[in-house]
Amino acid sequence: MTATQGGDGTLSLGQVITRSDLVAESLRAAILAGRLRPGQTLVERQLATMLGVSKTPVREALIGLTSSGLVVMSRNLGAVVRSLSADEVRKIYELRLLLEPWAVGRAAERNGPGNRHAARGALEDAEAAAAVDDQVGFNLANRRFHRELYLNADNDLVTGQLDRMQDLIALALQVAEVWRGGVRPFGSVEHTEHREILEAVEAGDPARAEALTHQHVVHAASALELDRGDVPTPTPGTPR
């Protein structure tokens, strides 16, 4: 079987995959959708029964998810969905603050003025999901929106790093729900910022796209309450 990675990082037709790849994708989707929660123990036998496979592809899938950072191995519990601390979330957003604004600015430069961008479809999907209170669909569409924006930066190293960070950011959103007692951390402000960033990209204005993305990441970090206790939010720099 062959598959390629879709706009939200999932597998689609075009790239050679194995049964363990499919199991890993199923588990990854369950984690990102919140069906498997941070701190939850992943029992190979139970997962194999649930997915209708043997324990071998499950074991291989868990090893792969460990390397991506979604799963950690505990001496006492075995495989566990990673639970991020506030300090780890802060570090993720510090790295995101360094990479994503530059990547979006570069993508805006390459897009040129007056061209409809592929991220517009993802933005519309996010708004549609929000209208029917589909939190999972909303999160996945937002994830796709960000990826569509930075994908055209023409730097595989930066894009690959941002792709890996997307999974950890999804976990950070779940951590924020716990901190806030289940209240969603984002809403209309995020939609407004997304629209402004997209407009700058479609206008071919790299400086504005970069500055707006920088501001958006700082606001996202604040919404996640990274300033809880002794953990400060990332400090804005001076956008180019």
Image (cartoon, rainbow, N blue to C red):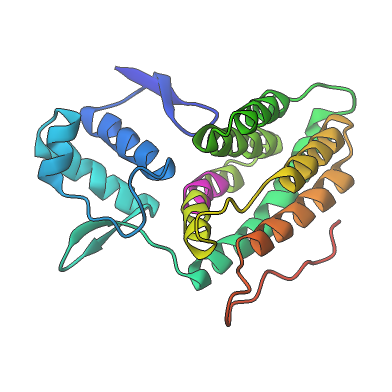
**In the picture, which quadrant includes the C terminus?**
bottom right
Q: Is residue 45 left or right of residue 51?
A: left
Residue lying at the far bottom in this picture: please name it: 230
Residue 182 lies in magenta, yes or no?
no
Give the total of numbered labels. 0
* Residue placed most toward the observer, 43 or 72: 43
Residue 137 placement (x, y as % from top left): 53, 32
Q: Is residue 122 left or right of residue 174?
A: right
- The structure residue drawn at horizontal position 65% and vertical position 26%, both measured from the top left corner, is 128
Q: Main secondary structure of the magenta part?
A: helix
Residue 145 placement (x, y as % from top left): 65, 34
Q: Is residue 59 left or right of residue 185?
A: left
Residue 28 placement (x, y as % from top left): 36, 40
Can you say whether 59 is above or below 25 in the image? below
Can you say whether 15 is above or below 162 in the image? above
Can you say whether 171 is above or below 133 in the image? below
Q: Find residue 134 and report its image quarter.
A: top right
Q: Find residue 194 and report its image quarter.
A: top right
- The structure residue drawn at horizontal position 60% and vertical position 61%, both measured from the top left corner, is 224
Residue 206 placement (x, y as % from top left): 85, 42
Residue 168 lies in magenta, yes or no?
yes
- The structure residue drawn at horizontal position 75% and vertical position 25%, both measured from the top left corner, is 117
**In the picture, which quadrant includes the N terminus?**
top left
Question: Which residues are the magenta region?
Answer: 161-169
